[in-house]
Amino acid sequence: MKHYLNKCFIPCLLMFCSTGLAQETKHIDEVVVIASRTVNKPDGYITNLKGMNIVKGKPAASILSFLPNISFEEGKFKINGLSVSEIYVDGVKLSDTSELNKIPGGRIDKVEVKYLAGAENNAALSGGSIIITLRRPENGGFYGSIMGNSEWFRSCGFGNEDVGLLFNARYKNLSLYDNMDFGHKKIKETAEQWQAEQDIQSLMSNSLVSSSVNFRNRISLTQEFKSGVQIGGSYLYASSNPSPTTKTFANNEWTSISEVTNIHLHEGTIKFSMPLRDLCKTLSLEICLYHYFFVPL
């Protein structure tokens, strides 16, 4: 009898254990861990915009307004209500923020926002800074885009046509960036005033018509070495020729005053940066040369 129980009990026990083990063994589906796109820092934050839906079909200038604590008011970018002191694109400080209108949002890799000017910035600045890093083309590759804009308000005679070109290329560790803009602007203003003295009435009319052809181009080269050292140079040229014409009608007489002015801007920047790995810092040196002049004709 004992021998019979052993023959029956042991196989049943093994069957129960195998069944229990089968129940405890479960298949775990693939687990995907998604890191936050925004890294908060004591003095600001860094956000990764690569592949986000908000960047599609929008220029960089429009995308910045969607970021936390950034607003665009009265023609200026502001951080927490304070005007932004400096805006950088790939390490080059912009003197003309209209360049952001010609950078497609899809080319932005990340944006760093600093709430206040730090020790590495100009001591005279009080507002924060925005640092934009563009996506680098693959080795030997390039990227180009053309953006256009046209506005016309017939009631007030205002017109604005604008075409922009962006070209970005890379060969090994040498990067090329070119941002070009060509536009035409027209403004028309008219004012009339009646004057009455006893039985005499007179009409005074004043009109202002102004048109301007604008051109701006910034090209920069950056060489990166294996040690992490970067040496870059940037050159900006901008020109415009506003030509206002004022016509006045008073006392049955017309007077006209015309003026043409050529405005030229030259700006050169040389930048050197070197990582200090032991201190987890980056040493940066930037030299800017600025020349602005106008020639009345």
Image (spheres, rainbow, N blue to C red):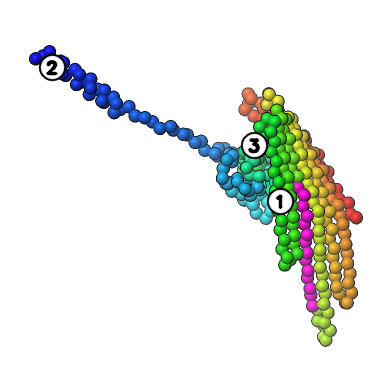
Tell me which residue sits at (67%, 55%) in the image: 74
Dot 1 or dot 2: first in sequence order is 2
Q: Nearer the viewer, residue 28 or 291?
A: 28
Residue at the limit of the structure toward the right, as seen here: 297
Q: Position of residue 168 (x, y in %)?
A: 71, 38
Camera sees residue 53: yes
Q: Nearer the viewer, residue 50 or 27?
A: 27
Residue kind at label 1, given as amino acid type = Gly
Amino acid type, callout 3: Arg
Foreground tag (3 vs 1): 1
Q: Residues under labels 3 and 1: Cα distance?
A: 22 Å
Residue 197 rendering spot, x and y as whole percentages: 82, 83
Q: Position of residue 267 (x, y in %)?
A: 80, 41
Residue 146 inside the magenta-drawn segment = no
The residue indicated by pointer 2 is 5
Which is nearer the N-term, disc 2 or disc 3?
A: 2
The picture quadrant where one finds residue 154 is: bottom right
- The three-letter code of the residue at mark 2 reads Leu
Of badges 2 and 3, the one in the foreground is 2
Q: Is residue 191 magenta?
A: yes
Is disc 3 surrounded by few (<14), some (14 to 19) or many (20+) residues within 10 Å?
some
- Which part of the image, by quadrant, shows the C terminus? bottom right
Left or right position of 2 against 294: left
In the picture of the structure, the residue carrying the numbered disc 3 is: 135
Up/down of 75 relative to 256, above or below: above
Q: Which mark is residue 148?
A: 1
